Amino acid sequence: MYVPDRFQQVDHLMIQELVDAYPMGTLVVPTDAGFEAHHLPFEWDRGASGAGVLRSHIAKANDLSRTPPCEALVIFQGPNGYISPAWYVSKPKDQEVPTWNYAAVHMRAKLRVVDDQAWLRELLQRTVSRFESSLTPSWYLEGISEGYFSRLLKAICGLELEVIDVQAKWKMSQNRTQQDLSGIFGGLESTQPDLAAFMRSFHKVVQGQIETPS
């Protein structure tokens, strides 16, 4: 991934928070026919050392379930969107062009397929608990019969990816003036509030350029 120095993100906590908030990743693996992409929710276990491990699961009917161990790429994306030059104030409008802001995390990893029902059971328990904990009413795996759950487990397999490199890019208008940033925030509030909030947090906490309005 092309990452100019000003857009490089090396804050481990911010990277972790993005992956936690947007766990739907794109897994890219090599095949004899070329590259294949798979869209999956991931658990990222940072562990005690290294870059951690990613885990997910797929149907055994998926050809990926028969993939031998290999190196793969997993991509996560946070809020992103169009930035209009009409929101800038620092230069004449005939000297500005649009751009696109985004946050992305790329992880190179060693992939292996896991066919272990105890491993899968624990992964699914953690996954369901994670996403159901904030819901009312909530649902848990204990609500289905053991026989039905066992049949489901036989139809899936796990993916475990040992992360060997993490690269992150936060393109969040770091090259703009404070006045331009204020204009961008104002424009995004009505069109893409999620991106506006993400940018505000980034600039306030990391760069200290903008204070969130009271």
Image (cartoon, grey):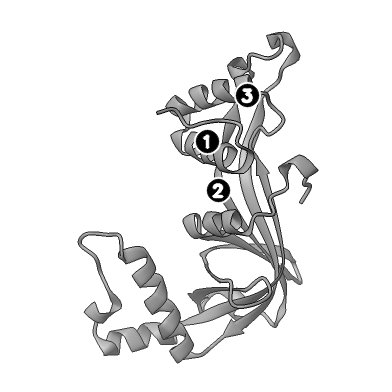
Q: Residue at x 62, y 24 (%)?
A: 178
Mark 1 and mark 2: span between their CA atoms? 14 Å
- As measured in the structure, the alpha-carbon distance from the residue carrying label 2 to the one carrying label 3 is 23 Å
Task: Find residue 108 and report its horizontal and vertical position in percent.
Answer: 72, 66
Q: Position of residue 80 (x, y in %)?
A: 57, 40
Of callouts 1 and 3, the N-terminal one:
3
Q: Which residue is mark 3?
A: 178
Which numbered disc, 2 or 3, marks the residue that appears first in the sequence?
2
Using the numbered discs, state the Cα–Cα distance from disc 1 to disc 3 in whole angstroms.
12 Å
- Of badges 2 and 3, nearer the viewer stands 3
Quadrant containing the C terminus is top left
Residue drawn where x is 64% and y is 19% of the image = 85
Query: Is 26 or 131 nearer to us in this picture?
Result: 131
Using the image, determine if residue 187 lies above or below residue 133.
above
Q: State the count of labels.
A: 3
Give the label on residue 78, or none: 2
> Hey, which quadrant is residue 83 in on the image?
top right
Q: Which mark is residue 200?
A: 1
Instruction: Kindly indicate the quadrant of the structure image that contains residue 134.
Output: bottom left
Q: Secondary structure at mark 1?
A: helix
Type of amino acid at the residue the image marks with label 3 = Gln
Kindly identify the residue that appears in the image at 50 percent across and 28 percent down.
188
Q: Secondary structure at mark 2?
A: strand
| x then y, percent, for residue 186 | 49, 22
Which comes sooner in the sequence, label 1 or label 2?
A: 2
